[in-house]
Image (spheres, rainbow, N blue to C red):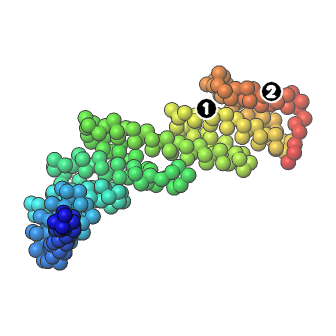
Amino acid sequence: MFFRKMKIPFLLLFFAAVFLSSCSKYQQVLRSDDTGKKYAMADSLYNRGKYKKALVLMENIVPAYRGKPQAERLMFMYANTFYVLEDFYLAGYQFERFETSYPKSDSVEVASFRSARSYFQLSPVYTLDQKDTYTALEKLQTFVNRYPNTEYREEANSMVSELRGKLEKKDFEVAAQYLRISDYKAAIEGFDNFISDHPGSTLRKNAFYGRMEAAYLLATRSIPSLVNERLLKAKGYYNAFLKYYKNSDLMQDAAKMALDIDQRLAQETPNSIK
């Protein structure tokens, strides 16, 4: 009974001693000037998934290994550690450096993809500034062009599609916001630009309708001398909507606006509320 009671505390002490010894060895290597030992331990920790500890050691020795045979592997591990730890700013940057420094490396394709994917991860929600989204699109397109037969092609194309969808939504919401705040000229221009810039968008129907609605509201709120001209322009936007989306769920509302436009044009004395 006594020995059984002693067994668990003994094991705890044993593992505690092993842990402390391991920590002590890590600290000793970290404090030493031996770059070889630091490299070996960083490599061992990296392979065992101890990325944060490995990173501290790698940061100590990266400058010392530039130009040496081990540098290629070290620089890939260094970049990939940031990637695994989801520090995507540094991962994207370090993978780019790896590509530039080792263009003939067996790992350069993976580095290029993970660099592009890092920028994809940095792309914010569509309501925010899309600088990182444009960077990610550029990186992904460059990757696909450079490696057309890559195993990552499907994933890369999927990311490109998602990023483009985000930019489409951003552009559409800008135009829609102008419509909501009654800046009808800006709304018309915004929807016009959207239609030109995003020909395959699922929001294209809404952009055609929004452009017509903005033109209709601008016309009906104009001074008398401008009403007819603007009503005719709104009717032209209706015809464009009708050409492509006559069977859409927005057709009924569009037809109501078109009927009112025709009635106002027939009166020859447009009503002004401005």
Which corner quadrant holds the N terminus? Answer: bottom left
Residue in view at x 32 percent, y 45 percent: 142
Helix, strand or loop at label 2? It is helix
Horizontally, is 226 left or right of 17 in the view?
A: right
Q: Nearer the viewer, residue 93 or 195?
A: 93
Vertical comparison of 251 with 114: above or below? above
Q: Which residue is situated farthest in the front direction here?
A: 1
Front disc: 1 or 2: 1
Say what amino acid the circle numbered 2 marks: Leu
Say what amino acid the circle numbered 1 marks: Lys
* Residue beneath disc 1: 205
Helix, strand or loop at label 1? It is helix
Residue in view at x 45 percent, y 41 percent: 162
x and y percent of residue 112 in the render?
27, 49
- Give residue 192's quadrant in the image: top right
x and y percent of residue 105 in the render?
16, 50
| Numbered circles on residues, count | 2
Question: Which label is found at residue 128?
Answer: none
Vertical comparison of 162 with 93: above or below? above
Question: Which label is found at residue 259?
Answer: 2
Residue in view at x 60 percent, y 46 percent: 173
Q: Nearer the viewer, residue 241 or 95?
A: 95
Q: Using a 10 Å C-alpha cutoff, classify the residue at mark 1 as few (fewer than 14 neighbours), some (14 to 19) or many (20 or more).
A: some
Residue in view at x 65 percent, y 44 percent: 176
x and y percent of residue 249 in the render?
66, 27
In the rendered image, is residue 135 in sight? no
Q: Using a 10 Å C-alpha cutoff, classify the residue at mark 2 as few (fewer than 14 neighbours), some (14 to 19) or many (20 or more).
A: few
In the rendered image, is residue 206 in sight? yes
